[in-house]
Image: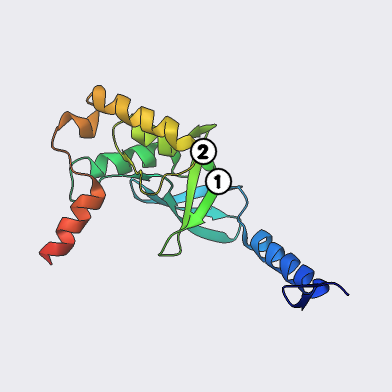
Amino acid sequence: MKRLLGLPSSILTSVFFFQYFLCYAFAQRPFTAVVTSIIDGDSIKVRDGRKKYEIRLYGIDAPEYGQPYGAKAKKLVKKTILRKKVHVIPVERDKYNRLVAIILYDGKSINKRLISSGLAWYYPKYCKMRVCRDWRKEWKKAQKRRRNIWKNSSAKAPWKWRQEQYKKK
């Protein structure tokens, strides 16, 4: 029996396949679901048969309720996808155990639509996929065209606004 790193190769092979299986088994595949509620501009709830998911939209950050355009961002999402069948492309889970995903309706990303409408920030801290390059361009276009949020040159990113609110408490 060959030994590698002081262990029999059969044990190392078993460990490798076990780890591979775990990664594969817990990877979330894309699925279709119905949007059951809109929490805010960047969070929704969906149902896939009997399973329910709370989803945070990947790569974006929409204004909070206390910020200008927070209600308008929620309204756009509600008007576009509430009670509609969407395609969910999971990316990861966040620290609150929500599914973080790209949501497609009629073949188009609601994440991107919020950005191009000037109702969400492209979130560079968390947006690392290839699609983020395109979203960043849309974000710049929305700023240049002064769409919604960008009508106000002093618009504050939601992550900065949340930090300020936390410090006030």
Q: Residues within 10 Å of mark 2 (few under 14, many from 20)?
A: some
Name the residue nearer the viewer: 166 or 148.
Answer: 166
Quadrant location of the N terminus?
Answer: bottom right
Q: Residues within 10 Å of mark 1 (few under 14, many from 20)?
A: some
Whether residues under marks 1 and 2 lie with C-beta atoms below 8 angstroms apart, the answer is yes
Note whether 108 is above or below 78 in the view shown.
above
Q: Name the residue at the top extreme.
A: 145
Name the residue nearer the viewer: 155 or 72.
Answer: 155
Q: Is residue 75 left or right of residue 103?
A: left
- Residue 24 found in image quarter: bottom right
Pinpoint residue 129: horizontal percent, then vertical percent: 49, 42
Pinpoint residue 146: horizontal percent, then vertical percent: 22, 25
> Hey, what amino acid is under mark 1?
Ile
Q: Nearer the viewer, mark 1 or mark 2?
A: 1
- Residue 23 found in image quarter: bottom right
Image point 45% across, 44% down: which residue? 128
Q: Which mark is residue 104?
A: 2
Pinpoint residue 148: horizontal percent, then vertical percent: 23, 31
The kind of secondary structure element at disc 2 is strand
Q: Is residue 32 left or right of residue 65?
A: right
Q: Earlier in the sequence, mark 1 or mark 2?
A: 1
Q: Which mark is residue 89?
A: 1
| Residue 3 seen | yes
Name the residue nearer the viewer: 112 or 128.
Answer: 128
Quadrant location of the C terminus?
Answer: bottom left
> Hey, what amino acid is under mark 2?
Leu
Q: Is residue 124 left or right of residue 1?
A: left
